[in-house]
Image (tube, rainbow, N blue to C red):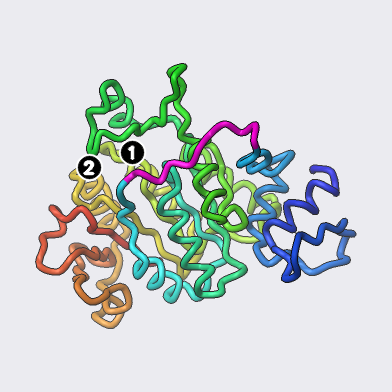
Amino acid sequence: MMAAHVLALILALADPAPAAGLAVQQRGAGAEAPPKREIYAKIVDELYDVSPYTGVGAGSWGFQPDRTYPHSHLQDFMVENILNYTKQPKFWLEAGSFIGNSAILTAKVMKKRGFDSSSVVCVDPWTGDVNMWAWNKGRTGPNHFNYLEMDKMGEPRIYETFLSNVHSEGQQDVIVPIRATSLVAMRLVARLHKEKRLPQLPDVIYLDSAHEKDETLMELRDARNILQPGGILFGDDWMWEAVRGDVTTFAQSLKLQRLPASTLERFGAPGWQVTQPADGLLVVGKSGQKPESDHFATWYIPK
């Protein structure tokens, strides 16, 4: 465990005081109620000696925010619908956070709704995937973006960019990173919960990491195992054949019941359509477009 004064600072960040400034006090055993964002505080307390945002934004930090990546497929209404379905989730786990666009969007929607007990745990090794490395030399990928955020010394700086982006958007009190692969992190979460070092398992799991055939299938199995009953497992990139194939195979293996129209309606929005390509598997995409060719098509498997 970390020193009491360090833990107190982290708890203050996770549960900002209503008055100006941060009220940092030592927490005696049982002396105070748990922090509002308890998952955030527990993750930092159990995994870090200091806050992962220590020094971010200071003059010596040296890494600038980069919000020039043109989009996140995750939409505000998708986050809103999931928050409604799961009834103010305390634990939102995101696997595959890249430079933070979707996590920042999620945190902002949570704050807009007044969900001050919700935490976003971002899981990513921040080392780049197959495409990012293949596109790096000459910036040959979509939009010629520097996907590795590679510096002049040839060092990928995706993680530092993620921290800078989260900090610059003021969401460091909601979003906490775990720098590990999705499988390592999900098994870590399961272990922390089993050892009573984490009060609960995730209410929501957003998968946006593996895009290679069979990788997504492995993630889906581990994610489903740690998802709370009544939770949502979802992800984007339905148009990717490898993702679509693995998600469909997984959903069919669960032998789920077909969801009624009333459930489909809970995930829709004007201008968007909800389909059920397999029992218990929903896909939300733009109206009038085939989901398999829609960049924004997102899949959901309620538990």
Secondary structure found at label 2 = helix
Name the spot of residue 38 as percent of width and height, x first: 67, 61
Instruction: Residue 20: tell me if it is visible.
Output: yes
Density class for disc 1 (Cα within 10 Å; few <14, some 14-19, many ≥20) is some
Which image quadrant for residue 15?
Answer: bottom right
Instruction: Write the residue at 30% across / 55% down.
Output: 73
Q: Looking at this view, name the residue that lies furthest to the top.
A: 153
Instruction: Write the residue at 24% across / 80% down.
Output: 261
Q: Nearer the viewer, residue 298 or 107?
A: 107
Asked if residue 297 lies left or right of residue 80, the reply is left
Q: Is residue 62 magenta?
A: yes
Q: Quadrant of the N terminus?
A: top right
Name the spot of residue 134 as percent of width and height, x first: 27, 25
| Real-space CA distance between mark 2 and mark 1, rounded to the nearest whole angstrom | 9 Å
Which SS type dominates the magenta stretch? loop
Using the image, tell me which numbered label, if any, was put on residue 242. Answer: 2
Density class for disc 2 (Cα within 10 Å; few <14, some 14-19, many ≥20) is some
Q: Quadrant of the C terminus?
A: bottom left
Mark 2: which amino acid?
Ala
Instruction: Write the residue at 30% across / 66% down.
Output: 256
Label pair 2/1, CB-CB below 8 angstroms: yes
Using the image, tell me which numbered label, if any, was put on residue 9. Answer: none
Q: What is the span of residues highlighted in magenta in the rendered image?
A: 59-69
Identify the residue under disc 1: 215
Instruction: Write the residue at 72% across / 71% down.
Output: 18
Q: Is residue 173 magenta?
A: no
Mark 1: which amino acid?
Glu
